[in-house]
Amino acid sequence: MINKDNLPSEELRGMKLYHYTSVESFCKIWLSEHLRLCKYMNVNDIFEKQKIAAIEIPPKAGIPHHIPIGEKRLEPLAFVFHIISQFKQISFCKDYDDGTLGCLSSMMWGQYAKNENGVCIEFDKEKLLKNKRGLFCDDIRYSKDIEFITFPAFVFKDNPADSVRDAIVKEKRKIFFTKHEHWFFENEYRVVSDIKTQLTIKGAVNCVYVLSSDSLNTKLIKSVVHGRVPIKCIQVDFDICNTHLRIQNI
C-alpha cells in the first residue's frame, strides 16, 4: 500500500521522469552532468530485436543484392539493421496511472537499481528535454501482439542510407516505442536519437532516492551530491495488515 501523501496530483503527473541505476553509474552521471544514451540494439525485450522481419522485393525490383558499407557489402536486411544500430536510446519510468510515484516501483528497484546498491533519479521532464532537436521522445505502447515490419524495396535504390533512415523514422512508433505487454509495469518513457549521444542533466534533477538512510552507498551519494539537490529515502513500514511505503528526507 502506498501512503496517500506520496501520490502526485493530476497537475504534476507526467511532469517528472525517473531513471533507476547503480550507485557507480549515478556517480558518473552526476559528475559528468550527462546521461549517456545506450545502443538501441542492446534493449532487453527480445521482441524488439525481431521486429524487422523482411524486405519486400517484388519481381524485377532492380535493387542490389548487396549494399556497400565501407569495405563490407551487406544484404538489404542486414543493411537495415546496420542503420538501426546507429540509433541510441535511454529509458525512464513515469508516475503510474493509479497515482503511484515512479520512484516507488519495487520491481524497478530490483531490476535496474540493484535494490539498496542503486538509486532512482527524479528529473524535471521539461528541463531535461528542453532541447529536443535530434531526439524522438514518446511513451512506450505495450501490446500483446508485436507487429512485424517489412521494408519496401524502393528504399534501397537511390541513396539507400538516407532512404532507409527515413523509412525507419516513418515507422519509429512501431520500431522504437512498442514493447510486448510483459513489460507493462515498467511504465516506460523513452528518448531515441541517431544524432545525440547524451542528455545534459544540469538544472534538471529534482532529487535522488535511495533505499537506506545510513548505508555506505548513501554516504557516498551524499558526499557526491553535496547538498545540491535533496536526497530522500524510501522506507518500508509494516503493520499487521499492510505494508506501507513512505518517503522521508535525509
Image: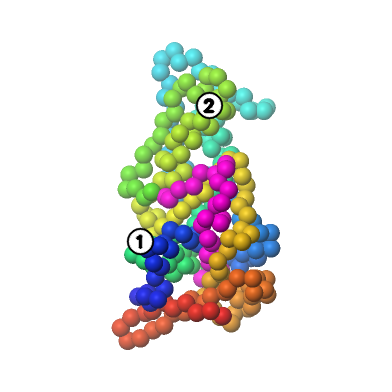
State the residue at coordinates (48%, 31%).
Answer: 167
Quadrant of the snapshot with the N terminus: bottom left
| Residue at the far bottom in the pictured view | 240
Q: Is residue 69 above or below residue 51?
A: above
Q: Position of residue 224 (x, y in %)?
A: 67, 71
State the residue at coordinates (55%, 69%).
Answer: 207
What label sits on residue 163 in the rendered view?
A: 2
Tell me if residue 48 is in the magenta stretch.
no
Nearer-the-camera pick, 211 or 131: 131
* Mark 2 residue type: Ser
| Residue at the far front in the pictured view | 11
State the residue at coordinates (34%, 64%).
Answer: 98
| Residue at the far top in the pictured view | 60
Boundaries of the magenta span: 115-140
In the visual, does 146 lie left or right of 247? Answer: left
Between the C-alphas of marks 1 and 2, the distance is 38 Å
**How is the model colour-coded?**
rainbow
Give the quadrant of residue 152. top left
Determine which residue is flagged by label 1. Answer: 97
